[in-house]
């Protein structure tokens, strides 16, 4: 009968070697190691929190710096605009002052500032009310303008107001001596711009009335320098003091 091999049972079961050692148990962590690992984790968390705080502080500093820069720039722009406005106002005052005595001698009023009567567009036949001066310098008007140059016949006020809205100047005249009317007509013709000369029998008294948007000056007679000053102040595109809402548009 054949010998059985060592390490196997006669039934083919698992090998059972004699003298094999029993499996060893897992080594339990040392308490000191656990404390060290815990401290390391705490240190890393603290580092992350500190890094977050520093990043947030940097963002805040950068935001404050940007805000400060914007404030400085806005302040500089405002200062420039205010300075420019002051300079322009002084320039305008000088222009007016330079002809004030001459305007007074010519029987001219100071330059008036009638209230704003609006910019409503109306159709022919619609009621036109609410004007704040005569002739009007703002208020309801037609959708078309009156053109420029010299008109031999009266022109509807609702056309003239649209001229003023576009930065034009209208010169009304009534009962002027022929020599004055001739000189006035020549000055208007020589002025290549949005200025229109019209007869106006509705003027309160003989003379002239210079009209721009919300500006009006009336005179007993014509004086070329007084008119030149008015045109310099209010005639687009070189107007020094125009408040016309649609400057730059043609008439």
Image (spheres, rainbow, N blue to C red):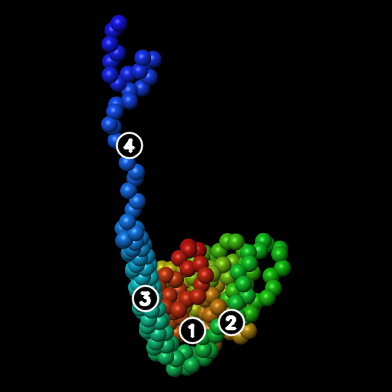
Mark 4 / mark 3, whichever is N-terminal: 4
Crowd band around label 3 with a 10 angstrom C-alpha radius: few (<14), some (14–19), many (20+): few
Q: Which residue is mark 3?
A: 68
Who is closer to the viewer here, 80 or 211?
Answer: 80
Q: Mark 2, mark 1: which one is toward the viewer?
A: 2
Tag 3–tag 2 contact (CB < 8 Å): no
Label of residue 22 in the image? 4
- Identify the mark at residue 47; answer none if there is no mark: none
| Residue 247 seen by the camera | yes
Residue 236 drawn above or below residue 179: above
Q: Residue at x 34, y 61 (%)?
A: 35
Q: Tell me residue 62's x, y (percent).
A: 34, 69
Q: What element does badge 1 sit on?
A: loop
Q: Nearer the viewer, mark 2 or mark 4?
A: 4
Circle nearer the viewer, 1 or 3: 3
Q: Which of pointers 2 and 4 lies earlier in the amino acid sequence?
A: 4
Reading the image, the residue beneath label 1 is: 222
Distance between mark 3 and mark 2 Cα atoms: 43 Å
Locate the N terminus by quadrant: top left
Q: Can you identify the residue that label 2 sits on?
A: 114
The alpha-carbon separation of the residues under discs 2 and 1 comes to 22 Å
Q: Give the spatial CA distance, label 2 vs label 4.
A: 114 Å
**Camera-side residue of 181 and 247:** 247
Instruction: Residue at the far front: name it.
Output: 1
Element at badge 3? helix
């Amino acid at each position: 009968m054949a010998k059985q091999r060592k390490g196997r049972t006669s039934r083919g079961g698992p090998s059972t070697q004699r003298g094999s050692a029993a499996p060893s148990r897992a080594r339990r962590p040392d308490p000191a190691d656990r404390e060290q690992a815990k401290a390391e984790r705490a240190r890393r968390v603290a580092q992350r929190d500190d890094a977050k705080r520093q990043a947030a502080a940097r963002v805040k500093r950068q935001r404050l710096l940007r805000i400060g820069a914007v404030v400085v720039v806005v302040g500089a722009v405002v200062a420039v605009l205010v300075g420019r406005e002051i300079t322009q106002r002084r320039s305008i005052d000088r222009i007016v002052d330079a002809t004030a005595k001459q305007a007074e001698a010519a029987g001219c009023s100071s330059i008036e500032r009638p209230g704003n009567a609006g910019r409503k567009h109306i159709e022919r036949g619609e009621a036109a009310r609410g004007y704040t001066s005569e002739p009007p310098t703002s208020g309801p008007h037609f959708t078309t303008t009156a053109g420029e140059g010299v008109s031999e016949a009266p022109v509807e006020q609702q056309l003239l107001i649209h001229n003023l809205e576009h930065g034009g100047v209208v010169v009304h005249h009534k009962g002027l001596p022929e020599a004055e009317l001739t000189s006035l007509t020549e000055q208007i013709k020589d002025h290549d711009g949005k200025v229109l000369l019209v007869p106006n029998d509705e003027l309160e008294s003989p003379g002239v009335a210079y009209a721009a948007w919300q500006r009006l000056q009336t005179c007993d007679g014509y004086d070329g320098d007084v008119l030149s000053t008015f045109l310099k102040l209010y005639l687009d595109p070189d107007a020094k003091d125009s408040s016309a809402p649609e400057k730059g548009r043609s008439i």
